Amino acid sequence: MLLCDLRSDQLLDAVPVQSLALDDYIGKTGSMSATIPVPNAAIAARIRATVQPGRTAVWVERGREIWWGGVLWTARVASSTRGELSVQVGAATFDSYLDHRLLYDTQIAAGVDQYDIARGLISYAQSMPGGDIGITYDTAPSGVRRDRTYSRYDLPRIRDLINQLAAVEGGFEWRIAAYRDPETGRRVKQLQLGSPIRTGSAEIVLDYPGPVLAYTWPVDATVQATTWQSRGATDNRNQAAESHPLMSELLVADADLAAGWPRLDGSSDYSTVIEQATLDAHARADHARARAPLTIPEITVRMDGSITPALLGATIRLRIRDLWWPQTLDARYRTVGLAITPPERGRAETARLFLEAP
């Protein structure tokens, strides 16, 4: 594990770790946990000087390949009953840094490509004194233009603004990928944008029984809704009149009700949205996601060399034949999450892949 200065990415130290576990996702923050053994005073001095939560960047390497990168947020020194010392560390992917950055200046975009709005928010964060942590990005457009006004009086978090922009109808996915540039060898923190994010060209075929050791297939209707309405900002300009929030159109899935589904009501809040069209677009996107039960299959596979973090966004072909699928499930899915479980006594290292229909 490499420990670097978060702002400059200057290498501070390289340390061996135990009980390493990491995960990464499209659409949410990934995490890493590990234990750094402290066998002597020299190692203790090194760790004390370099493990600084909130200031240290963590890169996980396998050989020369970067598997994970993020910000060190927690550290806990622990001693055992035998007097053995260790430091247990926790980190989150680089997008977590944007949870700790606020908008202090009003930003207005009129007819701007939605990718450029997201890039502009990150540029704003990195333009402030001490705010540049080296996030890079390209200039490819999405082809979708938006009007947005972000008020400094709301003190919004940069990550929340990007998430909200991405979640609207016709929106996008984003993540900050960590990798080593194959030409320069430099460690890279790059903003990835996609509608959706897709990577790789050759699909991997995974079979159960076979490389797939186990699977789960959850179906969650607690988040399902056949009707939907979203609530926006409250208009307080006329102090003499009663204030009401902006409301989206009421969306009803008539086809679902006609097919026998019960009425299931859902709602969402966008307290900073002041435009009717924007709120309606949020409502339509939220309703589209909520009309079917949430299903994110999860498979556990052997770490055989073909499973790497580069699978995020890639398409796999999954084939399952068992009692539940006696005729064999044979379908393609996009990988939207990956979690690596360290080896334990009697158990090899495995990875869990979280899947989505492409």
Image (spheres, helix red, strand yellow):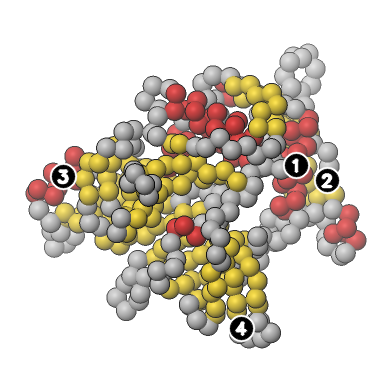
Mark 1 — residue? 283
User: For the residue marked with disc 2, what is the amino acid?
Assistant: Leu
Q: Mark 4 or mark 2: which comes first in sequence?
A: 2
- Picture residue at 71% right of the left edge, 52% below the top: 289
**Mark-to-mark CA distance, 1 and 2:** 8 Å
**Mark-to-mark CA distance, 3 and 4:** 52 Å
- Picture residue at 45% right of the left edge, 36% below the top: 136
Residue 193 is drawn in which quadrant? top right
Mark 2 — residue? 251
Is the Cβ of the residue at disc 3 closer than 8 Å to that at disc 1? Answer: no
User: For the residue marked with disc 4, what is the amino acid?
Assistant: Arg
Mark 4 — residue? 321
Mark 2 neighbour class, 10 Å CA radius: few under 14, some 14 to 19, many 20 or more: some
User: For the residue marked with disc 3, what is the amino acid?
Assistant: Arg
**Mark-to-mark CA distance, 1 and 4:** 39 Å
Q: Dot 4 lies on which element? A: loop
